[in-house]
Image (spheres, rainbow, N blue to C red):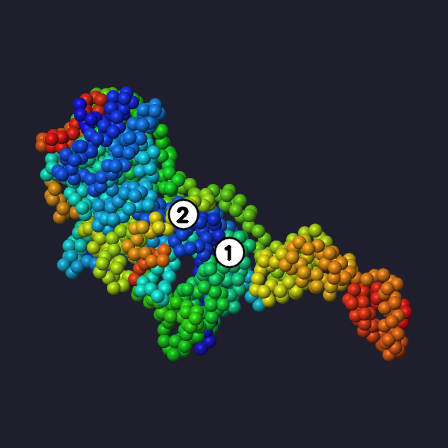
Amino acid sequence: MELIQKTAAQLHQLLRDREITAAEITDAVFAQIAACEPQVQSYLALTEESARKTAALVDEKLAAGEELPPLAGIPIAIKDNLCTEGVTTTCASKMLYNFVPPYSATVVKKVEENLLPITGKVNLDEFAMGSSCENSHFQKTHNPHDLSRVPGGSSGGSAASVAAGEAVLALGSDTGGSIRQPASFCGIVGLKPTYGAVSRYGLVAFASSLDQVGPMARSCEDTAMLFSAISGADEMDATSCDRGHRADYRDYLARDVKGMTIGIPKEYFGEGIDEEVSAAVMQAAEVFRSLGAQVKEVSLPSSPHALSAYYIISSAEASSNLARFDGVKYGYRSEHYQNLQEMYVNTRTEGFGAEVKRRIMLGTYVLSSGYFDAYYKKGKAFQSALCAEFDACFADCDFLLTPTVPQTAFKLGENVDDPVKMYKSDICTVPVNIAGLPALAMPCGRDSQGLPIGMQLIGPHFGEDVLLSAGHHYEQATGHQFTVPAIASK
Amino acid sequence: MEIDVRHIAKLSYLKIEDNEIETYQKQMSDIIQMVEALPDQADFDAKPKVEDAMQLREDEVRPSTPRDKLLQNAPQVEAGCVVVPKTLE
Amino acid sequence: MEYEVVIGLEIHAELSTKTKIYCGCKNSFGSEVNSQCCPICLGMPGTLPTLNKEVVEYAIRMGHATHCTINNVTKQDRKNYIYPDLPKAYQISQYDIPLCENGYLDFMVDGEKKRVGITRIHIEEDAGKLIHAESFEGSLVDFNRCGVPLIEIVSEPDIRSPEEAHAYLETIRSILLYLDISDCKMQEGSLRCDVNVSLMPKGSNTFGTRCEMKNVNTFSGAVRAIEYEMARQKEILDAGGVIEQETRRWNDAKGVTELLRSKEDAQDYRYFPEPDLRTIYIPEVHVEELKATIPELPNQKIERYMTSYGLPQKEATLIAEDVSRSRFFEQCLEGGKVAPKSVCNWLLGDIAKVLNERGCELDDLALTPERLVELISLIDQKTISTTSAKTVLECILDDGEIAIDQIVKDKGLAQVSDTAVLEAIVTEVLAENAKAVEDYHSGKTNVLGFLVGQCMKRSKGQGNPGLMRQLLEEKI
């Protein structure tokens, strides 16, 4: 079996048994990048030299018989909205086309401490705003399962690189579904952690109260390993915390699904959800039932409104977070200006793409004088109501099961002119961010066109261990095995 | 629902061309209409909650960043300072 | 028409914590440009604030000192506006739930007690500084001051004259110094204020339209700005005009206020809760503990100096208002060796004169309370005269090492109480002043003072004047 087809856990075993070297894994990944990058276009920047250095260091330590972290030597791609000291961090925006941060995100530091070779920075929708990766200023990433389709977004580069074998693991960020939707479109696993479980320091903010960094991987076990490495409280992020934190989430994978209660929220299976998708998720519910879990219908009546609340809260925060991009301290500065006002306006007008401007405008509007109560406060009120509904479900359910996305990957260009239609691809994922909950997205079959279908397991706050063990049991029961799609493995 | 796109653009420090106004007007209105369908939560209490309390930082000095490193991304630097067009207020 | 002025003040005080409010950079003044900064100060993408605990505690202490209600469960909010000295394009401040609110402050104006309400005290971050060099086309931005912690103290519109405003400012300043939470150096911008001024017809209860003046950086500037604005508004009203609600800037050099922006141009700050910080929660027990750390404040001191030490109000106030002076004063009294009035006289007399001449602070002198007590004791014990003591003081103001008895000895300042020596002087003086002796015997006994003076002169100021008088009375 080729190295690029293997999971991180398998590679770790091979490294520990001294059957392969970290250098060989890195070689294999960069060879795959060279082979499929022209079609897939996941990467905005490659950091081959430093990746090879890290791999060499791992091999040296292994040779010396040192005990290494489990993910040492496993190549990882980093979403380009996570700051990497000395390496450009563009957020796929013209605004930051030349930005080289003098600091690294806490998660990047943790990845480095765990000796994972970083392959490079991967594509996203500009400032993580979008669901298709088509909003990148630099390039469009293609879905490795069908190059005419989008990989999803905003962490489209992260998902495509893992699916295509261009990286074994990736870090993504999720504000309204940005890890889970592309994971679903690309047939991989993605975890959106509980708000606060992972440090946001160094993640370029889109919507501070909703953003979370999370792992994207080829199996639930890999996801558990990467989540163990990056999670935990950070003194640089006042919103992070250690509640429910586990040192190694693999220790909980064996926990039995038998006796668990799984809630099926009926609102996530109705109108607007593709029938093939619904059927695949219901089939997965049957698998859990066969493993000894109880499955029951539950209700989250406020869910259909979550998208509205999401657009108010996320746009409001984005309008404030993105006001700092003004051409003064870093990034793009317009060449056309006579005075300060013109410099600000021209820099921002030229530097931001259409979707980003749309959200800044919307956010400014909902916060502007006279509208705060009607919109922002109303959105916050809705948030607390939705949280209460979720809490009620978790009173007697261990986790909830829903589709991740209403449909499978759509064609490039299909939704670009209709923002509201594009936004609707987030209807199943957005409520989770609004409620600050953890959710695991993982493959649960294919549609008639052979495109991956994803299901979403939603847990109570800090219930990542439950989700990962349930997902792991599902993989075992169904004999799920990650494979790099044919297009990318040519 | 009429949104004053020009005023919002001014607050946002963005230039919206005349031929874009209508598109913005429509797209923003679509979203706002969606928002207006949100149910009212009369009993909502917006006050901060003790259970959301954060840990405060101890007052201990940490090293600052060397100036050259800090300003390496600035479009224009002069005498150790970032430069902007003449500004008097 | 006669008008009454209505004044409200917003004071921004920089807190003297070791680090900035949202990062660990040093909170210091006067460093090289952009040398006390990190990516957080510059609002670089992805950076996050972490709130300095000391800032919250300092603000709560100020709240206690001004009898505020402390909101121990609160939050911070973003105030959005774009300006080159504000790197994040928003200031982290507090909007609807200030840390402290509904307090008051009592102080004396012209011997009368005045009470001004404190609307709120909240915490926020300072902005950077723009530097305008003549030789250069653009403006330069120094971010060192970004993130320096501030408290904003907002008063109720209870102030009714420029004098009251001045006294209020002085009182706030002395409290900040007593609490040791701000260095209050006006010349460094540690204390700045915005002044709201309106006029209403005398006897009315309805406030007129107010104007806000920014950029007031000295107390005397505040007084002049208020006086200017009173005159400007009176002129408009007397001419039948109306006052427009506007923001004006105090131009200290020209001594005028200038229009900054009208109400129509009022900025829309789009406040909303700061999502990068969670709830600020200080347990009630700790709020009370902080209350216990509040030292005796000037008002209480004045009262105590008057009742316990018998100082007149004026002297009590002069000592209590000045932190270092009152600390010195109280240290002098610790051993109970000298009379409060004597210490007071020295502090407000000769010592104050020197400080005034030199334009320096008590702490800048080498003189310690122990040494002043030693000096006063020598007078009390009649070892030296008051005149000689002044000579000694000159020596010990700047020299903390030299022994006082050494000075007395070296300069021959010790009082002479040797009866034989003094008798000789008295005999001589009586012989040389036959006219005075005659006057004395004819009933003009007050010439005795003159004769004592003559004896002192002859003894080069060292004779014990009491003993000298006694001997004169015997021999005359």
Task: Check disc 1 and give the amino acid type.
Answer: Asp
Q: Quadrant of the N terminus of chain A?
A: top left
At label 1, counting other C-alpha atoms closer than 10 Å, the crowd grade (few under 14, some 14-19, many 20 or more) is some
Say what secondary structure mark 1 lies in: loop
Q: Which residue is drawn at 50% across and 45% down?
A: C287
Between A291 and B42, which is closer to the camera in this rendering? A291
Tell me the amino acid under the disc marked 2.
Ser
Subunit ID for the residue under disc 2: B
Query: Quadrant where the C terminus of chain A lies?
Result: top left
The residue drawn where x is 79% and y is 70% is C457
Residue topped by disc 1 = C183
Residue A457 rendering spot, x and y as whole percentages: 24, 31
In this view of the protein, can residue A154 be seen by the observer?
no
Indicate the position of residue A101 as horizontal and vertical percent values: 30, 46
Q: Which chain carries label 1?
A: C
- Marks 1 and 2 belong to one chain: no
Is residue C140 visible from the viewing direction of this image? Answer: yes
Please determine whether, in this image, residue A414 is positioned above or below residue A220: below
Q: Residue B64 carries which label?
A: 2
Marks 1 and 2, Cα distance to the nearest angstrom? 23 Å
- Name the residue located 21 percent from the left edge and 56 percent from the top edge: A349
Residue A188, x across and y down, in percent: 20, 31
